[in-house]
Amino acid sequence: MTKACVAAIAFLSLLQACKDDENKFNPLESGFITYLSFNGNLSDSSKYVTAIDSCAASSYVPGVNGEALILDGNCPNIKFDKLTFKNSQNISVAVWFKTSGNGSTWHFIRSSDFSIFTSHGTAGIGISIPETKSAKGSFELDMWTHLVGTYDGKTIKAYINGKLVASTIHKGEISAPGYLFELDGGGITTGTLSTWTGAIDELYIFDTVLDEEQVKQLHEM
């Protein structure tokens, strides 16, 4: 192979690398509102939300990237000072979670815009307009699972580990009670107080609707 051919191949490889970089999804430059890494604290990198009612000593364990927050009987509920994250009707929520709970429905992340829940071996996102509908898919117990839920005013979508698993038509304007944004390990099960025990990591909330390629790249980060 001549030097000219080698140079041409190298140049084409460089162009492809530049193109790949241009197309690479950066969640911190893509309409994100809140990012909680849970690396030993409850800080929001955008400073949009601040914890106002939290456990005296939140617990952390190794997560998918650094540390992850534990919600359990010792620390079941953490409230923040904001209600809403949406821009018009657009919203996306992404989180890694791990739990051994396989019982009734627990809304372990919620705000006035959405709820993230597990229910009988499935996980998903719920939206109220005010009638509540959801999109959900199955997950493996005791394994880290990446969940992304999106809503655009017409359709709720749920992605599990980078793949679209459910799409639910739900047209309207988000309209829910004035819930403060919270991480909630407490839940009501057949009239008694139960506790969702699990870990959460890498929580992003966007005021845009992520597409399938962005969801895939976020899962692979």
Image (cartoon, rainbow, N blue to C red):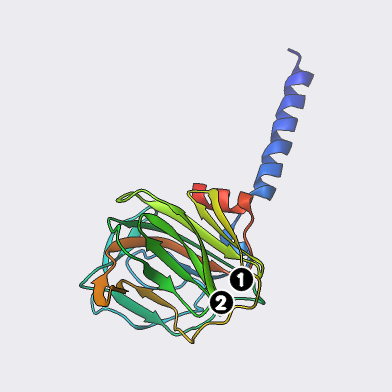
Q: For this rendering, which residue is in front, 111 or 200? A: 111
The residue that appears at 44% across and 83% down in the rendered structure is: 180
Amino acid under label 2? Phe
Query: In the figure, is residue 140 to the left or right of 111?
Result: left
Q: Position of residue 103 (x, y in %)?
A: 30, 61
Residue carrying label 2: 85
Q: Where is residue 191 in the image (x, y as percent from the top left)?
A: 27, 77
**Quadrant of res 183:** bottom left
| Secondary structure found at label 1 | loop
Residue carrying label 1: 207
- Spot the residue most to the top: 1
- Mark sitting on residue 58: none
Q: Position of residue 82 (x, y in %)?
A: 48, 83
Asked whether residue 221 is in view, the answer is no
Q: For this rendering, which residue is in front, 113 or 194? A: 194
The residue that appears at 71% across and 37% down in the rendered structure is: 16
Mark 1 touches mark 2? (CB < 8 Å): yes
Q: Where is residue 35 in the image (x, y as percent from the top left)?
A: 49, 68
Asked whether residue 47 is in view, the answer is yes
